[in-house]
Image (cartoon, grey):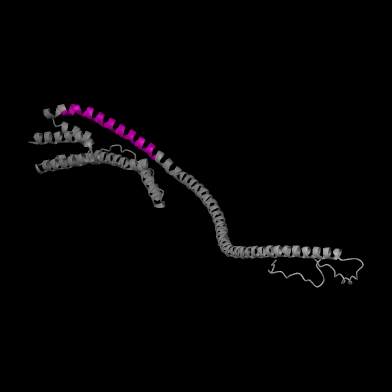
């Protein structure tokens, strides 16, 4: 029965070693099963094995992997948190790498803790010394498994060095973030100054355009007012001119009538002048026919000729003009 219990415990331990490196969750489940199996063997009367396990756990020391990367990771996290509090925030690539780094560190810690809790090489060697032939074959496979474990440890250390290099790179990026932020802020300020200068120029142009528009509006209003005044003046002057034209037409009509009256008066004066000339010629002829020796009565004094020079006898007046001549 003791041999069977030792064989079952050894087989469970081998299965645990095969599945311990697949993940943290599977490792924890295998640890629980191993503990229950070990407790069952203790309940069956395996007190010496318990004492041996405690002695092995107290005497055998495995080298622990150095953990300088944990502090660096914590410092990097603090710097990232400070950048987030300041409003800058990490880069997208850094934010994506941070969970991966934490997962890798947690896996490494869990594996180191499992190796520290269970000193498996010495435990398996002690169990294999009982002389059970069923355990000899798995015992021969233990060096290969130990070699694989050492290779896994070397790979973990290589991964740890890679994590350290990534942390250094992230640290340099975090150190370069303030400079990038300052350069970005300076570029934004330059753009802002340029836009403000353009805005001031646009405002000046707008003010000049508004002044020109006001002057144009004033000129337009003045032209409208002048056009209204000229239209009113044109109406009044056209009415005056029409009245003057009517007066001129009336004066021309009156002048035409006066001219006709003057023509009629002139024709009457012409006839009267012809009659007077004929009468004068007859008087002269009668005076020539009278005898010279006879007493000739004295001729009346000749009157001066009038403005017409018609040679009318004394006491004869020219007939007045029948019509009134108007200028």
**Residue 167 position by quadrant:** top left
Asked whether residue 152 is drawn in magenta, I would say yes
267 with respect to 101 (left or right):
right
Q: Is residue 51 visible?
A: no
Residue 55 is situated, as x and y percent measured from the top left of the image, at 21, 40
Residue 241 is situated, as x and y percent measured from the top left of the image, at 60, 63
Q: Nearer the viewer, residue 129 or 235?
A: 235
93 with respect to 293 (left or right):
left
Check the image and report above or below for 320 versus 263: below
Check the image and report above or below for 41 versus 253: above
Quadrant where the N terminus lies? Answer: top left
Residue 280 is situated, as x and y percent measured from the top left of the image, at 80, 65
**Residue 315 position by quadrant:** bottom right
Asked whether residue 68 is drawn in magenta, I would say no
Check the image and report above or below for 135 versus 91: above
Q: Residue at x 19, y 35 (%)?
A: 19
What range is drawn magenta here? 138-167
Q: Residue at x 11, y 35 (%)?
A: 8
Judged from this view, the residue extending furthest toward the left is 1
Q: Nearer the viewer, residue 284 or 302?
A: 284
């Amino acid at each position: 029965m003791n041999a069977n219990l030792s064989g079952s415990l050894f087989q469970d331990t081998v299965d645990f070693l095969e599945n311990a490196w697949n993940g943290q969750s599977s490792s924890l489940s295998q640890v629980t099963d191993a503990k229950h199996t070990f407790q069952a063997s203790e309940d069956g009367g395996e007190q010496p094995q318990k004492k041996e396990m405690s002695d092995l756990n107290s005497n055998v020391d495995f080298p622990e992997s150095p953990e300088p990367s944990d502090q660096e990771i914590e410092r990097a996290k603090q710097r990232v948190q400070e950048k987030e509090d300041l409003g800058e925030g990490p880069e997208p690539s850094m934010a994506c790498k941070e969970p991966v780094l934490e997962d890798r560190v947690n896996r490494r810690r869990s594996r180191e803790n499992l190796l520290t809790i269970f000193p498996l090489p010495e435990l398996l060697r002690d169990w294999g010394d009982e002389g059970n032939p069923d355990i000899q074959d798995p015992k021969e496979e233990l060096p290969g498994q130990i070699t694989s474990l050492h290779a896994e440890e070397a790979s973990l250390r290589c991964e740890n060095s890679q994590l350290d290099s990534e942390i250094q790179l992230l640290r340099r990026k975090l150190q370069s973030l303030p400079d990038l932020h300052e350069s970005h802020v300076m570029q934004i300020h330059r753009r802002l100054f340029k836009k403000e200068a353009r805005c001031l120029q646009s405002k000046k142009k707008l003010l000049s355009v508004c002044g020109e528009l006001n002057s144009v509006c004033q000129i337009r209003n003045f032209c409208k007012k002048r056009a209204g005044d000229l239209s009113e003046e044109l109406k009044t002057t056209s009415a005056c001119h029409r009245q003057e034209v009517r007066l001129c037409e009336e004066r021309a009509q009156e002048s035409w009538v006066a001219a006709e009256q003057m023509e009629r008066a002139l024709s009457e004066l012409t006839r009267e002048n012809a009659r007077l000339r004929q009468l004068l010629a007859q008087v002269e002829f009668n005076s020539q026919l009278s005898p010279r020796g006879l007493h000739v009565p004295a001729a009346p004094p000749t009157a001066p000729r009038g403005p017409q020079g018609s040679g009318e006898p004394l006491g004869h007046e020219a007939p007045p003009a029948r019509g009134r001549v108007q200028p």
